[in-house]
Each structure stands twice: as C-alpha cells, then as structure tokens.
Image (cartoon, rainbow, N blue to C red):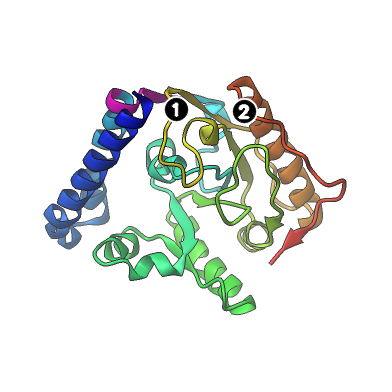
C-alpha cells in the first residue's frame, strides 16, 4: 500500500507541477507579491496531496524563536520535503541554492523572479562574495535568508561536515542565525521512492545572536542543530547520528 501511495503521489505531483509551471507563466509579469500568491496555490495543493495520498503531515515547534526582521535560517536538510515547505514555514524567504537549478527550463525562471540566491559551487571565494552581495539585498528587503549549512541532503543517522557558506553569511550580514531542526528524512528518504506515513516535526531553535566569532557560531550551530535533529529523528524511529569530536567547516 505504501508503494502504491508513493507511486500515485509521484504521478500527481509531477503532473500538477508541470501544469503549474506553464499555467503560471503569465504571473511572471506581475509583482513579486502577486506572483507568490499564485505559487502558494501550487505549494498548498502539493501539501494537500502529501496529506491525502501519502498520509504525511507536519507540525511546527518554536515559531516564537523567529525574529520579526531579517535573519539567517540554517535548516537541516534530510530530504526534498523541506525544499517544498520553506515558503510555508517562513515569510517570503530567499533561499541559497546551487546555480545549476537556474538552468532548469521554466523552473529556473521562477527561481530568478522570486529572488533566490544562486551559488556556483565551483567558483570558490568568488561564489561566497556573490552570495553575500545577493543576500544583503534580500536582508535590506526584510526577508529571511534560508540556507542548508551542510550543502546537500544528509540522511538521518549519517554525518556530513558543515560548509563555510553559513559562516560567511553570518559575518557578512550581521543578523541572527536561527537553527531549524527536523526529522523529515525518517518519513521521506533521501532519493527514496517510498514515503512513510506520519507527522514530520520542524523545530525552530533559539537564535544565535550576531557578533560572535565565526568559529564559535559554527560550533554552536552544529551542536544545537545536530542534537535537536537527532532527538526528533530518534523519537520518530530513526537512527542516532555519529559525530566526530571536532567540528570543522569545509568549503
């Protein structure tokens, strides 16, 4: 039954998304706010499909930890699920994403129009400077910056080093960092076709204030985000995560 539900959801999701990609093209001529209103239709119907077909819902803990102004939301990345939810969880976030996504036909145009922050992962320090410049524009607009600090999806029970991007944003933007823990990978596996019914938990942790040394912020972020995500994953039936004794950030 789970496999059949997963297959049905996949067909419906990609069909719905394809229809929306082309049907919403005229919205690119509208204002940012008007365009986002139409994109929210796509997001909400997608969430309805998750609940109805897959039996997957979610709950949010710690919304009070999100500041009113701009901030950096450092989100745990376990599956594709959270990429579909950031706009439902945060007020008009600007998401840091790999620049290759801008090359996806039609979809890449939407990413540009909505003010996402592309990063060319092969460009080294130039990519970091470009990311900070783009992020400063979005912060001036009062938008939160969302970033996956490990840079890619990491399944529950596995460890991956944190990259320097979130630290560079922290130094360059002078805004708080809010860790966003979750356990989506227990239900929606990394590159897994089969989705398990249940309730995903997203937890916003207390913000890390601006002005700390970068290394201290990185240590706090990894410790707090990994501990909370492991707690949520284990509570949902997932495995614990082994971690090295020393935290190091990679490029």
Compared to residue 224, the image places residue 1 above or below, namely above
Residue 21 placement (x, y as % from top left): 20, 55
**Between discs 1 and 2, the one toward the N terminus:** 1
Residue 43 placement (x, y as % from top left): 29, 40
Which label was assigned to residue 196? 1
Q: Secondary structure at mark 2?
A: loop
Q: Quadrant of the N terminus?
A: top left
Quarter of the rendering containing residue 195: top left
Q: Secondary structure at mark 1?
A: loop
Compared to residue 136, the image places residue 63 above or below, namely above
**Relative to the observer, which residue lies in front, 34 or 101?**
101
The magenta segment is: 52-59
Residue visible at 24% across and 34% down in the picture = 45
Residue 186 placement (x, y as % from top left): 54, 31
Quickly name the residue at label 2. Answer: 238
Residue visible at 76% across and 57% down in the picture = 214
For residue 56: magenta? yes
Left or right: residue 83 versus residue 108 is right
For residue 250: magenta? no
Quarter of the rendering containing residue 67: top right
């Amino acid at each position: 039954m789970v496999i059949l539900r997963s297959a049905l959801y996949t067909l419906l999701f990609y069909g719905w998304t394809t229809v929306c990609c082309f049907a919403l093209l005229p919205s690119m001529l509208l204002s940012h706010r008007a365009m986002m209103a139409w994109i929210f239709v796509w997001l909400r119907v997608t969430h309805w499909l998750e609940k109805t077909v897959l039996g997957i819902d979610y709950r949010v803990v710690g919304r009070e930890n999100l500041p009113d102004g701009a901030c950096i939301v450092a989100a745990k990345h376990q599956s594709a699920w959270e990429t579909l939810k950031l706009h439902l969880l945060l007020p008009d976030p600007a998401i840091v994403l790999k620049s290759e996504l801008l090359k996806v036909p039609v979809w890449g145009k939407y990413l540009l129009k909505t003010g996402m922050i592309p990063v060319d992962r092969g460009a080294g320090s130039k990519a970091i400077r470009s990311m900070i410049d783009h992020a400063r524009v979005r912060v001036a607009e009062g938008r939160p910056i969302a970033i996956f600090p490990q840079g890619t999806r990491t399944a529950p029970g596995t460890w991956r080093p944190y990259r320097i991007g979130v630290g560079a944003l922290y130094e360059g933007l002078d805004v708080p960092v809010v860790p966003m823990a979750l356990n989506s990978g227990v239900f929606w596996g990394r590159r897994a076709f089969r989705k398990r019914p249940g309730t995903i938990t997203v937890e916003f942790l207390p913000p890390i204030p601006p002005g700390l040394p970068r290394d201290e912020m990185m240590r706090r972020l990894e410790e707090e985000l990994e501990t909370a995500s492991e707690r949520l994953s284990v509570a949902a039936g997932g495995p614990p995560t082994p971690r090295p004794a020393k935290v190091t950030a990679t490029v």
